[in-house]
Amino acid sequence: MKEMLTIAMPKGRIFDEAVELLRQAGFNLPPEFEDSRKLIIDVEQEQFRFILAKPMDVPTYVEHGVADLGIAGKDVMLEEERDVYELLDLKISACYLAVAGLPNTKMNDVAPKVASKYPNVAAAYFREQGEQVEIIKLNGSIELAPIIGLSDRIVDIVSTGKTLVENGLVEYERIADITSRLIVNPVSYRTKDERISEIVDKLTDVIHGVRS
């Protein structure tokens, strides 16, 4: 009998693309899987238990061992810096982290402020640039910050750039390319290595276009 694995995943775009990837890799997920409103979904035929979580919480669940595996954006991995292993770049949900603000504006020379829901990433980036800034943590609608005068710049995820344009903002610097990653709890990686390796191998074949 297969060994039960618990996988933490975020709802939304990553979830939809990850489910499709798992199906392409040969894992039998039921057709109604995406429509469930449950936060924990068991797929007995594959011996999978899925925990549906907020994106920022996925690495926490994996680090503390309540999930063996997780699927998380590289943005979350950079921000959270959890004690997990990154096994595979799944090449899904591609986007990037960028610095943006109102057009033709300079950073405040006296007390520059940067708003972001990625305060650690933002602080590290501006530190590397030799700029001392005040970081303001926001949880949503980051684009509002420069418009209402809360900050000089924002650091946020950009997919198409449409949201920036619609809010009258421009991109100033690109920080990092982002895709979703398969992560694992270090203990699970040792104790359930055979099952985890099987999953990694099947996903790798799909990502690289290998057909059995």
Image: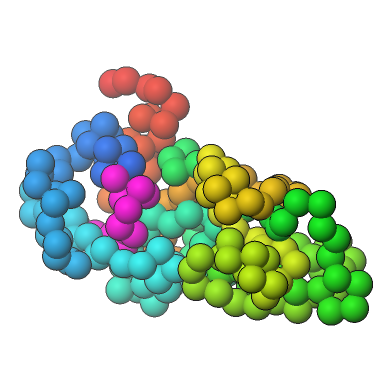
* In the foreground, 22 or 127: 127
* Left or right of residue 124, residue 1 in this image: left
Task: Identify the magenta region.
Answer: 4-16
* Left or right of residue 108, residue 151 in this image: left
Coordinates of residue 5 in the picture (x, y in percent): 24, 59
What residue is rendered at 8% in x and 54% in y?
A: 44
How many marks on residues?
Answer: 0
Quadrant in the rendering for residue 47: bottom left
* Residue at the top extreme of this rendering: 211
* In the foreground, 9 or 135: 135
Coordinates of residue 191 in the picture (x, y in percent): 33, 63
Asked which colour scheme the image uses, the reply is rainbow
- Specify the quadrant that holds the C terminus: top left
Residue 192 seen in this snapshot: no
| Membership of 6 in magenta stretch | yes
Quadrant in the rendering for residue 64: bottom left
Residue 29 seen in this snapshot: yes
What residue is rendered at 66% in x and 52% in y?
A: 169
What residue is rendered at 12% in x and 57% in y?
A: 36
* In the foreground, 143 or 96: 143
What residue is rendered at 47% in x and 38% in y?
A: 91
Coordinates of residue 150 in the picture (x, y in percent): 67, 75
Coordinates of residue 21 in the picture (x, y in percent): 31, 38
| Membership of 15 in magenta stretch | yes
Quadrant in the rendering for residue 204: top left
* Left or right of residue 76, residue 38 in this image: left
Above/below status of 37 relative to 167: below
